[in-house]
Amino acid sequence: MFEATADRIAEGFSWTECPRWHEGRFVFSDMYNARVLALPPEGGTPETLVDLSGREGRDGEPVILVGTGFLPDGRMLVNSMFEKLVLAVDGGGAVTVHADLRDLAAGPINDMVVDAAGRAYVTQLGFNLWAQEAPAPSPILIVEPDGTARVATEAGDLMGANGIAISADGSTVVTAEAFANRLTAFDVRPDGALTGRRVFAELDELPDGMCMDADGAVWVAQPPAFRALRIVEGGEVTGRVTVPPEEAGSSTACGLGGPDRTTLYLCCGFEVFDWEASRKGAQGSIWAARVDVSGGTTRP
C-alpha cells in the first residue's frame, strides 16, 4: 500500500475542481469565480487562462465553469455547467460556443475528458444538486470534434456521473458514479461509442473527480473522507493520499501531473453550496503529493 500526505501549494480560490496537466502547467477550475487558472508544477502565483466572471449566461443561467479539455488545434474546451454549453477558448481569449447541450442534458453538465482526436465525453449530474432535487440517472454526452453532439444511449444511464478519464491506449473510459458509490468502465469503439459497460470498483464513500495512471489504475477523490485512493479494476485499494481536513476541507478532485506525471494534485475546498460564501471565503486550495506510478499518456 502506497501512502502519502499531500502538501498545500496554492490557496485563495472558491471551489476548486477539474485538475488537468497541460503543456507543463497545472490547470484547474476556480468554479464560482468563473475562471480557469494555471499554476507552475510546484505551485505559486496562478495565471488566469479564462475569466468569464463578466459573461451574461444564456437563458439567465449563472456561469459556473467546470470540466476542461484541449482540442488538437490548441483551443481549450470548458463546460459552463448551468448554461449547458461547451465553450471553446482560443489562444487570444476569444470565446465561442463549441456545443450547445441544452436539448440533450437532463441537468447541469459536469466534468469532461477530451480524447486525442478532439472528441469530448461530458458527464452530467442529471438533476440540480444545488436546488436539493433528488438524484436521478442520466447518460454521458458525446461531442464530436466539429461540435456536433449526441447522447451516448449505448452506455445507458448513470447515477451522477462525475469525474471521467481515458486510458493511455484510448481503449477504456472510466467514470465515477457519485450517487452509486462506484466506478464504471466502458470500452471505446473506433467511432467513439461506449460499450462493454462494467463495474470497475465498488466504493465505501462517494467518489468525485478522478484520473487514471499508466498502469490502468484509477485515482479517485472522496470528499467526505479527505483523501484520494488508487484503485485497480476489481476494487483493490493500492494507494492513499490524504489531506488535513481542518486546513484543506473536502478533497473534490485529483489529477496526475508534473514533468514526469508522478505528482498527484488534489483540489480542495470548504463551501460548495453557498456560491457567494465560497467566493468571499476564498478557502479553496490545491495540494500535491508524489506518487509511484506516472499518469503517462492518460487523459485528462
Image (tube, rainbow, N blue to C red):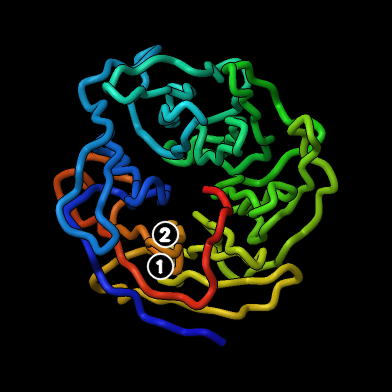
Residues under numbered marks 2 and 1 in contact, where contact means CB atoms less than 8 Å apart: yes
Residue at (81% x, 55% y) in the render: 198
Tell me, yes or no, if residue 11 can be seen here. yes
Q: Nearer the viewer, residue 116 or 130?
A: 116
Are there few (<14), some (14-19), or many (20+) residues within 10 Å of tag 2?
Answer: many
| Mark closest to the chain's N terminus, 2 or 1 | 2
| In the depicted structure, whether residue 106 falls above or below residue 296 | above
- Report, in whole angstroms, how far the alpha carbon at label 2 lies from the one at label 1: 5 Å
Task: Kindly give the residue lying farthest to the right in the view shown.
Answer: 196
Q: Which residue is mark 2?
A: 257
Task: Kindly give the residue lying farthest to the top in the view shown.
Answer: 59
Residue at (15% x, 52% y) in the render: 45
Tell me, yes or no, if residue 81 can be seen here. no
Residue at (47% x, 37% y) in the render: 69
| In the depicted structure, whether residue 56 falls above or below residue 300 | above
Amino acid on which the number 2 mark rests in the picture: Gly
Image quadrant in which you'd find residue 242: bottom left
Q: Position of residue 73 (x, y in %)?
A: 47, 26
Q: Which residue is mark 1?
A: 263
Compared across the picture, whether 138 is left or right of 244 comes to right
Compared across the picture, whether 3 is left or right of 165 comes to left
Residue at (79% x, 34% y) in the render: 190
Q: Position of residue 263 (x, y in %)?
A: 40, 67
Say what secondary structure mark 1 lies in: strand
Q: Position of residue 159 (x, y in %)?
A: 66, 46
Quadrant housing the N terminus: bottom right
| In the depicted structure, whether residue 144 falls above or below residue 236 | above
Q: Position of residue 212 (x, y in %)?
A: 58, 59
Are there few (<14), some (14-19), or many (20+) residues within 10 Å of tag 1?
Answer: many
Amino acid on which the number 1 mark rests in the picture: Thr
Image quadrant in which you'd find residue 158: top right
